[in-house]
Image (cartoon, helix red, strand yellow):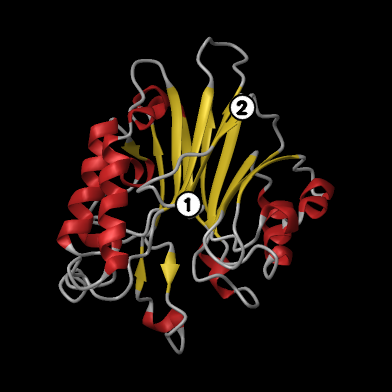
Amino acid sequence: MRFSLSTWNINSVRLRIDLVAKFLKSERPDVLCLQETKCPDDAFPLKRFKRLGYEHVALNGQKGYHGVAIVSRLPFASTDIRVFCENLDSRHISVAFAPEHTASPLVVHNFYVPAGGDIPDPALNPKFKHKLAFLDEMKSCEPLHPQGDARHILVGDLNVAPHEHDVWSHKQLLKVVSHTPVECEKLLAAQHQGGWLDVARERIALSEKIYTWWSYRAADWTIANRGRRLDHIWVSPALGPCVQDYKVLRDARGWDRPSDHVPVTVVMEL
């Protein structure tokens, strides 16, 4: 069974619903995980997604900030929402798909990790302190430690570019939030604790640049190309051999009124 999943920080699903529709019509992933939907659940554009063929929707939204959603052409067997740092920000949702040829369900976790503000000092910046605590809780969260034949996928805007070539300049960004050593260490610790495989870096050498985000502040993002890889797809070891393809839709950054993030897609043979 071919299965495709995309993740995209859309930076307001209602503002950019036409871009989402354009992407879905073109790429047709089985599942799309969205972050920063900035939309309460009762205002989510359900009808538009259903017209596009995505009839199954799991929501964890809030007005004006954060928010995550999973839209799917396949039915869910169950959904779940976890709270991190005792904070009710809408930053996680997971779904399970019923197995077809195996006893192991397919579980998808969708995350929007806190951005962390501008000052990389938890003593001076509560947002950065929150981000570090959130990453610590991801590491210690038992449901994020898939074992044996468990088929799990963890995706989302994790707001950390953990490797040297996940950013345009390792040296210049060492003191910039999203690439500071403490953030990188904590995200990699969460990945390693759960046994997750980072699909991008399993398929693309650490020596090669990969970006999924380009700042709005650049006068011409294509010329500056000062990107960061903030959007991730991890799979449990059981799914590692199933991965067939991985792609970053860089062109989406140049669409009309785009998000500063672009869609990232994994294709698997289950």
- Label tally: 2
> Of circles 2 and 1, which is in front?
1
Residue 78 is marked as 2
Taking depth in this image into account, of 209 and 138 the one nearest to the observer is 138
Position in image of residue 55 (x %, y %): 77, 40
Q: Are marks 2 and 1 in contact (CB under 8 Å)?
A: no
Residue 88 is marked as 1
Residue 178 appears in the picture as rendered: no
Taking depth in this image into account, of 132 and 14 the one nearest to the observer is 132
For image coordinates 25% across by 61% down, the residue present is: 129
Quadrant for residue 31, please give it: top right
Residue 231 appears in the picture as rendered: yes
Position in image of residue 149 (x %, y %): 40, 16
For image coordinates 65% across by 77% down, the residue present is: 256
Position in image of residue 85 (x %, y %): 35, 48
In the picture, which quadrant includes the N terminus?
top right
- Looking at the rendered structure, the secondary structure element under dot 1 is loop
Mark positioned earlier in the residue sequence (2 or 1): 2
Count residues near mark 2 (Cα–Cα under 10 Å), then give few for <14, some for 14-19, many for 20+: few
- Spatial CA distance of label 2 from label 1 is 21 Å
Q: Does residue 37 lie above or below 69 as drawn?
A: below
Looking at the rendered structure, the kind of residue marked 2 is: Ser
- Looking at the rendered structure, the secondary structure element under dot 2 is strand
Taking depth in this image into account, of 250 and 106 the one nearest to the observer is 106
Looking at the rendered structure, the kind of residue marked 1 is: Leu
Quadrant for residue 228, please give it: bottom left
Taking depth in this image into account, of 60 and 257 the one nearest to the observer is 60
Quadrant for residue 160, please give it: bottom left
Q: Does residue 78 lie above or below 126 as drawn?
A: above
Residue 36 is marked as none
Position in image of residue 105 (x %, y %): 53, 19
